[in-house]
Image: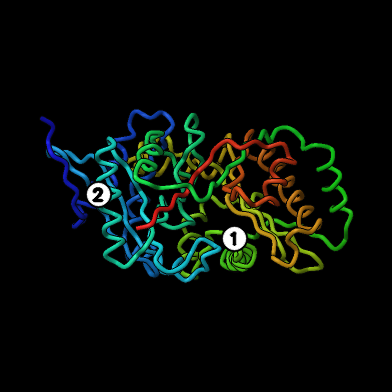
Amino acid sequence: MAAPLSVRPVGDKHDRKTFVDVAYRLNANDPNWVRPLRMEALELIMPGKNPFYEHAEQQLYLAERGGKIVGRISAHIDHLLLGMPPEQGGGKGIGNWGLLEAADAEAATSLIQTAEDWLRSKGMTSAMAPISCSIWEEPGLLVQGHDHPPTVMMGHANPAYQGWIEALGYRGIKDLLTYDLDITQEFPPLVQRIVASGERNPRIRVRQVDKSRFDEEAALILSILNDAWSDNWGFVPITASEIAYTGKKLKPIVFEDLIRVAEVEGEPVAFMMTLPDLNELTRDLNGSLFPFGFAKLLWRLRHPKVRTMRVPLMGVVKKLQGTRLASQLAFMMIEYIRRASVENYGSTRGEIGWILEDNQGMRSIAETIESKVNKVYRIYSKPL
């Protein structure tokens, strides 16, 4: 007879470490799962460390069977999401769960039901999941593209999770897409003509960021982002403390020629951020920077040679969205970053996204440069 399953709340620091460690054990045999750095994974769930908890509350749970941990989940409420309009995926009563790892269907079911109970106890009337933990971190469940590793800041999951989640009454409400492309090839002639036309336009300037003015440049990008994305589904404003926290973490992998700001008549109106795929640089470190991983990573960041570049963020101010100028600026930034990626970092592949399934403007740009959807992440909802 199988040992009974129990689900209990995470309590002390040892429990939090266990919460992090269970992911390494359950995914050990998946060749496409990338071990996160343990210190980063632990900081993600630490109030006082992660500024997400300045506007969110959370309860972590562990599933145990026969003295062995067989799963984990986070139940959480983002109070900024509660203040967003329903047409953008927000509104009163919407709670979240995420960070799901489960050895089997029984563990997954018990964990999700426990998370739902906690959300109900907090007055939530629906669950939107998985969100791990903010929409800006790892939203959605991977439902297509399990056959290759995720890039930096993207998630990966056991393919069985989809069936287990849907069996509990969850329905997909939004798909998030990533696009893959060969960046060693020049873009189609149409794109090249658009870029060349922009280069002849004296009103347009596309510049690199200046890392010596990091805080100022970060604030500029944040202002464009919050304007550009403010009407998007799932948008939650990024707070000043979150941008400072994220900026500090990203600074070592920020390279000036990979982040571009587009100006029209001297006004910054668009940006594109590209990051070397940190997963390629840390994959052999087994989740630890000690004793020698830190030195290896520092060396690799000083001399980055990576196959893949990821474009996680891009934005054009709202007053230009839907115009030919906006598309032209996007193509110019993409082309300049493509050249730098190939020439300066030896990269051969790019990944763009995520992109909302109904963001036709961004999907059109991605398809015009002949990129193809390589991964789909699905966000589900269920009434409570």
Residue in front for this viewpoint, 366 or 351: 366
Q: Where is residue 139 in the image (x, y as percent from the top left)?
A: 46, 51
| Quarter of the figure with the N terminus | top left
Q: What sort of colour scheme is used for the picture?
A: rainbow
Label 1 Cα neighbours within 10 Å, binned few <14 / some 14-19 / many ≥20: few
- Residue depicted at 51% across the width and 34% down the height: 145
Q: Nearer the viewer, mark 2 or mark 1?
A: 1
Q: Where 278 sits versus 149, above or below?
A: below
- Residue depicted at 64% across the width and 63% down the height: 228
For disc 1, the marked residue is 232
Q: Position of residue 257 (x, y in %)?
A: 67, 50
Please state which amino acid type lies under the numbered disc 1: Asn
Q: Where 182 sits versus 96, above or below?
A: above
Q: Where 163 sits versus 381, above or below?
A: above
Q: Position of residue 94 (x, y in %)?
A: 41, 63
Q: Do the residues labelled 2 and 1 touch (CB within 8 Å)?
A: no
- SS state under label 1: loop
User: Relative to 372, is 69 on the left or the right?
Assistant: left
For disc 2, the marked residue is 17
Residue in front for this viewpoint, 89 or 226: 89
Question: Based on the displayed image, in which of its 4 quarters is residue 316 positioned?
Answer: bottom right
Question: Can I make out residue 218 in this image?
Answer: yes
- SS state under label 2: helix
Please state which amino acid type lies under the numbered disc 2: Lys
